[in-house]
Image (cartoon, grey):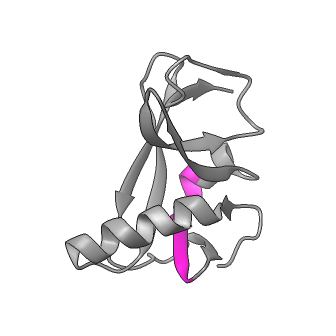
Amino acid sequence: MDQQNLTLSPSAAARVAAIAEKQGKPAILRLSVEGGGCSGFQYKFGLADAPESGDAIAETDGVQLVVDPVSLDLVSGCVVDFVESLGGAAFRVENPNAAAGCGCGSSFSV
């Protein structure tokens, strides 16, 4: 199931490709949402070996972003970016569904 309402930025795609190459894995980033965090939900990132049945898939520069159907309801329309700043480097989710976020950027509420 291909979804164009997910976006993986070129900088995030490049970072995933670099990490995957170091670990000898396919360049597939899984974004999932779990309960918890300081705002009710938190994002979880990890490399995936392959998309699973029902996953939404977005692709940028040959790198795939995959999201399971349950998490997709909460992140539909989001952009996954990779940001480097003085505070460190991190994947960041720009989520139009989030009513409120937190300072760390890794949790949100709807």
Q: Residue at x 61, y 52 (%)?
A: 80
Give residue 85's position: percent from left, percent from top. Answer: 51, 34
Magenta span of residues: 62-71
Left or right: where does residue 66 sit relative to residue 101? left
Comparing 8 with 72, the one in front is 8
Q: Is residue 67 in view?
A: no
Q: Is residue 59 above or below residue 96?
A: below
In this view, the residue farthest toward the left is 23
Residue 3 shown in magenta: no
Quadrant location of residue 56?
A: bottom right
Residue 67 shown in magenta: yes
Give residue 14's position: percent from left, percent from top. Answer: 50, 68
Q: Is residue 93 above or below residue 56?
A: above
Give residue 106's position: percent from left, percent from top. Answer: 49, 31
Q: Residue at x 60, y 80 (%)?
A: 61
Quadrant location of residue 12?
A: bottom right
Quadrant of the frame with the C terminus: top right
Q: Is residue 39 above or below residue 97?
A: above
Q: Residue at x 76, y 70 (%)?
A: 4
Left or right: where does residue 61 sit relative to residue 37? right
Q: How many labels, in total?
A: 0
Quadrant of the frame with the N terminus: bottom right
Comparing 3 with 54, the one in front is 3
Give residue 46's position: percent from left, percent from top. Answer: 35, 57
Q: Is residue 35 above or below residue 96?
A: above
Q: Residue at x 52, y 27 (%)?
A: 107
Q: Is residue 7 in view?
A: yes
